[in-house]
């Protein structure tokens, strides 16, 4: 994994980093808390009416008494939800105020730091030159002083803004800790321990976690599985333990939810599945290293196959448009194929692969815009930062399909060290945001688009799936209803991620249209799909030979790239 070099502010020692979070997700949590408060308030009113229920007899008296006891419990719970909502609101408002200026200053400080280093180097070179005139020397000194002054002023601005955010962050953590401590039946000391663990970046979380006793770690995993199971910096095996507990609890409430069923098939043992009447699938069980069943519109999850902490090679699979965790069994099968083939055919040892369903994927209507990618990039950035702590010495390859590549590129390109990613392999990419296309110089980029994959061209704004021309403003609303129509060059499609990876300097293109290698026929990928042919170019199933199906030229090249750094055909 590429080494990450962080700049630190000169006076306060603040790391030069953009904030990690999603305003949309915070707003969603506020909304959910508000909805739960309203539901419980309504229920509280009904229970209150039972305390004065007319009638006589032991049964009525017992009912009235039970209602009084229930109200005594419901009151503190309502108060807790109110405090949590207020704490989240304050946190979101502080984040919204700090995020834009911090992001701007991060870029400006980096640029000024590079300029100051260049001016310093030019000054040193000038002062050692035997023939440098006084005028040239004065100019070099002035340039160095100007660059140093500009950097100092920007650092001062950054420390002021980041310091305000740091205080707000600490206040928010204190509010959460106090609120958790007053929940009926909770352990106040454990809430303080929780506050100490969650307050930091993944490396700081890992350090705080290691400092706890076995009993304290076990208690946090038991009492706060939703938090610990998704906290970057906590070891993956312990996160999986917490998330499996949360999954079993969710299944006990709704064993037929298709998202929960798919996740369960990917990670639970057969005997556990039998408890809920869920059919097992072939293959090994993965580790549920991330699980958010109530995150925004879709359930979110990440499943690891293999020992990530001990891996020398980690592969990340990122799905695209219209994907959801219901696809996890299929993508989990691909993760297992990667591990098996990289070991068996290429002799790679200690390989792990993660199927990452960590963002709300867009529909056809949403796909032309960057909203889902921006939110997903924030989540992917957090996950990769955690991966850097979990497997600091591993090489990381990101394999991203369609809009998943749009999302991944926005994350990888947001960091000067590309978040430790070594290879970025795009398949049927929907295009990148132009602003980050030039920031991928530190990662090896590979790209393929099958000849029949015209939907990728739709994503990057280069084609439309129907003719004649239709106004761009109404086109997204009718794309979902178009099936058997020709693809034509686009006269002005509304897309905000129009940079194709194959057009970026240094990108290595590889084939996915079928080839014969050593007597073996590698099949073509007929359309946009990763597995089946639901996105075949003519709208009809041709065969199940998507980009990630073993035996296709695409799959062969992807595994060859991961193993050798070059395509195989």
Image (spheres, grey):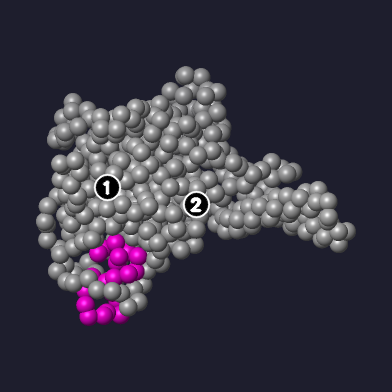
Instruction: Tell me if 284 is positioned left or right of 308 in this view.
Output: left
Q: What element carries label 1?
A: loop
Instruction: Tell me if 64 is positioned left or right of 441 in this view.
Output: left
**523 within the magenta span:** no
The residue that appears at 29% across and 66% down in the rendered structure is 458
Which picture quadrant has residue 484?
bottom left
Residue to which mark 1 is pinned: 569
Residue to which mark 2 is pinned: 441
Mark 2–mark 1 CB contact (< 8 Å): no
Which residue is situated farthest in the top direction here?
214
Which picture quadrant has residue 373?
bottom left
Instruction: Tell me if 324 is positioned left or right of 143 in this view.
Output: left
The residue that appears at 48% across and 32% down in the rendered structure is 392
Q: Residues within 10 Å of mark 2 (few under 14, many from 20)?
A: some
**470 within the magenta span:** yes
Q: In front here: 98 or 352?
A: 352
The residue that appears at 35% across and 65% down in the rendered structure is 460
Q: What element carries label 2?
A: loop
User: Is 448 above or below relative to 186?
Assistant: below
Q: In front here: 325 or 510?
A: 510
Q: In front here: 505 or 93?
A: 505
Residue 363's tag is: none
Which residue is situated farthest in the front direction here?
131
Circle nearer the N terminus (2, 1)? 2
Residue 138 appears in view:
no
The residue that appears at 37% across and 69% down in the rendered structure is 495
* Residue 79 position within the rendered picture, expressed as x and y whole percent measured from the top left: 48, 44
Calculate the distance from the C-alpha at mark 2 to the C-alpha at mark 1: 24 Å
Residue 509 appears in view:
yes
User: Is 459 above or below relative to 115?
Assistant: below
Q: What stretch is highlighted in magenta?
A: 454-475
């Amino acid at each position: 994994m590429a080494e990450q070099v962080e700049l630190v502010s000169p006076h306060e020692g603040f790391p030069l980093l953009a904030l990690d979070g999603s305003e949309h997700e915070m707003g969603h949590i506020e909304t959910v808390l508000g909805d739960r408060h309203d539901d419980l308030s309504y229920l509280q009113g009904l229970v209150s009416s039972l305390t004065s229920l007319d009638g006589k007899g032991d049964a009525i008296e017992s009912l009235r008494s039970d209602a009084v006891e229930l109200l005594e419990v419901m009151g503190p719970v309502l108060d807790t939800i109110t405090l949590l909502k207020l704490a989240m609101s304050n946190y979101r408002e502080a984040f919204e105020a700090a995020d834009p200026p911090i992001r701007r200053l991060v870029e400006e400080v980096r640029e000024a730091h590079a300029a100051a280093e260049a001016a310093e180097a030019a000054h040193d070179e000038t002062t050692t030159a035997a023939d440098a005139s006084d005028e040239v020397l004065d100019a070099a000194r002035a340039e160095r002083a100007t660059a140093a002054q500009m950097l100092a002023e920007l650092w001062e601005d950054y420390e002021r803004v980041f310091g305000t955010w740091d205080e707000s962050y600490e206040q928010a953590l204190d509010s959460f800790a106090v609120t958790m401590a007053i929940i009926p039946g909770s352990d106040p000391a454990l809430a303080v321990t929780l506050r100490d663990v969650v307050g930091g970046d993944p490396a700081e979380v890992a350090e705080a976690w290691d400092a706890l006793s076995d009993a304290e770690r076990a208690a946090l995993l038991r009492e706060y599985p939703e938090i610990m199971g998704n906290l970057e910096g906590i070891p993956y095996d312990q996160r999986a333990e917490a998330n499996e507990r949360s999954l079993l609890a969710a299944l006990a409430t709704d064993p037929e939810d298709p998202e929960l069923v798919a996740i369960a098939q990917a990670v639970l043992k057969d005997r556990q599945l039998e408890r809920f009447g869920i059919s097992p699938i072939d293959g090994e069980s993965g580790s549920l290293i991330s699980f958010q069943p109530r995150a925004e519109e879709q359930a979110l999850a990440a499943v690891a196959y293999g020992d990530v902490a001990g891996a020398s090679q980690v592969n990340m699979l990122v799905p695209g448009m219209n994907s959801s965790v219901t696809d996890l069994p299929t993508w989990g099968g691909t993760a297992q194929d990667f591990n098996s083939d990289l070991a068996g055919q290429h002799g790679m040892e200690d390989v792990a692969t993660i199927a990452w369903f960590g963002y709300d994927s867009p529909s056809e209507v949403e796909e032309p815009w960057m909203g889902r990618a921006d939110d997903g990039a924030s989540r992917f950035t957090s996950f990769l930062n955690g991966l850097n702590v979990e497997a600091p010495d591993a090489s990381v390859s990101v394999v991203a399909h369609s809009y998943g590549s749009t999302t991944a590129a926005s994350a990888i390109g947001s960091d000067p060290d590309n978040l430790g990613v070594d290879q970025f392999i795009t398949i049927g990419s929907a295009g990148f945001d132009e602003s980050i296309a030039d920031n991928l110089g530190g990662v090896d980029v590979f790209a393929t688009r099958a000849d029949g994959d015209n939907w990728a061209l739709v994503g990057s704004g280069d084609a439309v799936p129907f003719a004649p021309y239709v106004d761009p403003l109404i086109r997204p609303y009718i794309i979902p209803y178009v099936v058997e129509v020709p693809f034509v060059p686009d006269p002005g499609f509304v897309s905000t991620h129009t940079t194709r990876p194959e057009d970026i300097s240094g990108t290595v293109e590889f084939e996915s249209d079928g080839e014969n290698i050593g007597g073996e026929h590698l099949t073509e990928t007929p359309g946009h799909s990763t597995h089946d042919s639901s996105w075949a170019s003519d709208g009809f199933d041709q065969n199940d030979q998507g980009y990630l199906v073993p035996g296709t030229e695409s799959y062969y090249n992807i595994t060859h790239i991961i193993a050798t750094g070059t395509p195989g055909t």
